[in-house]
Amino acid sequence: MNSKVCGVLISFWLHLIFYWTSGATEGRSKGFLAYRTVQTFQTYCTCNTSYSCSCCQSVFILYTKAEKKLCVNLTYQRNGLNIDMALNSDTLRSRTITNYKPLKFCTNIPGCYFSSACVNILELNKFPRSITACLRLDIFSKKRLWQLNYDCISISMDLPTIPGNGTTSTTMNAGMTSAMSTQTTTMRAVETEETTSTDVEIITVPGSRPTTVVDID
């Protein structure tokens, strides 16, 4: 009887040890796969006309050793609000919005093996003469994620008229920004891991505000 009881206890403990071991291994595996360093910044867009705004971020592509500008451009047109993501002058993806609801779309970044970018329109509201939008740009690179929260912008729906046949053209105000009162961007970093200086490099150009350069590959 004692031998049977001992056998049952040994079998029970072996199953219990196996369960703990497999559970710990699975937990480590899941934790490794889901792990990503997250950095969050607050910045603002630039509106060159009353009906168009650009929300940009400088990125440094490690593979090509080139620094480029990744922008989300929002332009109101007569057929709706056009939103495109561009790398310098190359349009990566474009959408025209007619139902003004929050949306998200992503694209790969040319010249990068592991990086992609997503536009998150967190708020999108249409009013009789304007559209307000609040967006976030997510840039993924291997195990790192940069989240750039842009100040909300207001885009006018009053488009300039074409002069001719006695029609007077409408002069649009340019040079507006979504943060005219601020001279510098306040950056708030939230990290899940201590990062090195090569993760995000701050470059200060004389006469301009600090620029955040994101290293992607």
Image: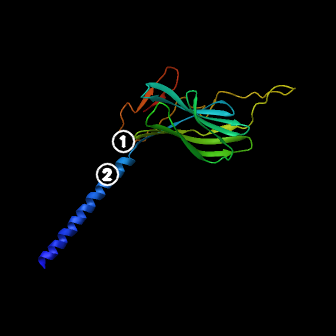
Above or below: residue 43 compared with residue 124: above
For disc 2, the neighbor class at 10 Å (few under 14, some 14 to 19, many from 20) is few
For disc 1, the neighbor class at 10 Å (few under 14, some 14 to 19, many from 20) is few
Residue 52 position in % (x across, y down):
66, 33
Residue 119 in sight? no
Horizontal side of 173 relative to 195 (left or right) equals right
- Residue sitting nearer the eye, 112 or 211: 112
| Residue position for label 1 | 193
Residue 150 position in % (x across, y down):
55, 38
| Residue position for label 2 | 28
Residue 210 position in % (x across, y down):
49, 27
Horizontal side of 89 relative to 22 (left or right) equals right
Name the residue at the right extreme: 166
Tell me which corner region of the image, top left, top right, bottom left or bottom right, holds residue 178: top right
- Residue sitting nearer the eye, 89 or 180: 89
Residue 21 position in % (x across, y down):
26, 58
Name the residue at the left extreme: 2
Q: Residue at x 19, y 73 (%)?
A: 8
As helix, strand or loop, the secondary structure at mark 2 comes to helix
Residue 16 in sight? yes
In which quadrant will I find the C terminus?
top left
* Mark number, residue 82: none
Tell me which corner region of the image, top left, top right, bottom left or bottom right, holds residue 92: top right
Query: How many marks do you count on the picture?
Result: 2
As helix, strand or loop, the secondary structure at mark 1 comes to loop
Q: Residue at x 27, y 60 (%)?
A: 20
Horizontal side of 80 relative to 116 (left or right) equals right
